[in-house]
Image (cartoon, rainbow, N blue to C red):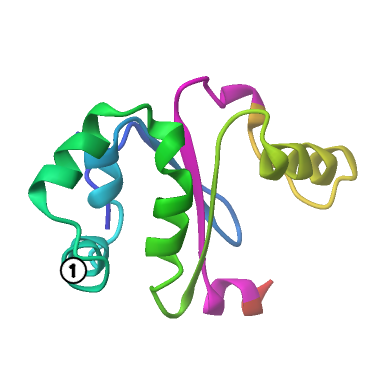
């Protein structure tokens, strides 16, 4: 699904994967449906895509989430260090409800938690 040269790191957990994204271009290669969605559904042209590639990555989080919400059979959460989702994950770690390597979360990166519904049902 993901290319190691584009995405810095993918960590596999029981019910999900945690994907580290360094650039908007890397985001476009996280899932096979993303490029199709950005071009057809959102009509994201090359000029706008190029602009997004040069903007700080965190400004694209709402756009990324809306793109990922179009992909069926998977659930995605897009977050960065110290945002609301990150704080919820810290709480879940402290509560021992799940375990995520939050110490490895870096500033200026965006992270995507991806889980398909079959993996969630199996847990």
Location of residue 67 by image quarter: bottom left
Q: Image point 20% across, 35% down: which residue?
A: 51
| Lateral position of residue 47 relative to residue 56, left or right | left
Q: Quadrant of the N terminus?
A: bottom left
Q: Is residue 71 left or right of residue 75?
A: left
Q: Quadrant of the C terminus?
A: bottom right
Q: Nearer the viewer, residue 23 or 14?
A: 23
Residue extending furthest toward the right: 95
Q: Quadrant of residue 23?
A: top left
| Residue 96 seen in this snapshot | yes
Relative to 68, residue 40 above or below: below
Q: Position of residue 73 (x, y in %)?
A: 45, 79
**Nearest the eye: 57 or 2:** 57
Residue 43 x/y as whole percent: 19, 65
Q: Secondary structure at mark 1?
A: helix
Q: Residue at x 18, y 45 (%)?
A: 49
Residue located 34% across and 30% down the image: 22
Q: Is residue 37 magenta?
A: no
Name the residue at the top extreme: 107
Query: How many residues crowd mark 1 within 10 Å: few (<14), some (14–19), many (20+)?
Result: some
In the image, residue 109 lies at what x, y percent? 44, 28
In the displayed structure, 69 sits above or below 31; it is below
> Horizontally, is 20 left or right of 31 in the view?
right
* Residue position for label 1: 36
Q: Magenta residues?
A: 103-120
The answer to if 112 sits in the magenta stretch is yes
* Front-lying residue, 118 or 68: 68
Identified at 54% across, 79% down, the residue is 118
Residue 11: image location, x then y, percent: 48, 42
Is residue 48 shown left or right of residue 67? Answer: left
């Amino acid at each position: 699904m993901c290319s190691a040269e584009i995405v810095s790191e993918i960590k596999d957990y029981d019910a999900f994967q945690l994907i580290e994204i360094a650039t908007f271009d890397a985001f476009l290669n996280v899932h096979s449906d993303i490029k199709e969605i950005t071009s057809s559904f959102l009509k994201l042209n090359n000029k706008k895509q190029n602009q997004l590639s040069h903007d700080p990555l965190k400004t694209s989080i709402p756009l990324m989430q809306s793109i990922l919400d179009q992909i069926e059979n998977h659930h995605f959460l897009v977050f960065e260090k110290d945002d609301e989702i990150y704080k919820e994950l810290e709480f879940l770690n402290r509560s021992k409800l799940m375990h995520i390597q939050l110490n490895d979360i870096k500033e200026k990166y965006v992270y995507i938690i991806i889980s398909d519904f079959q993996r969630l049902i199996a847990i």
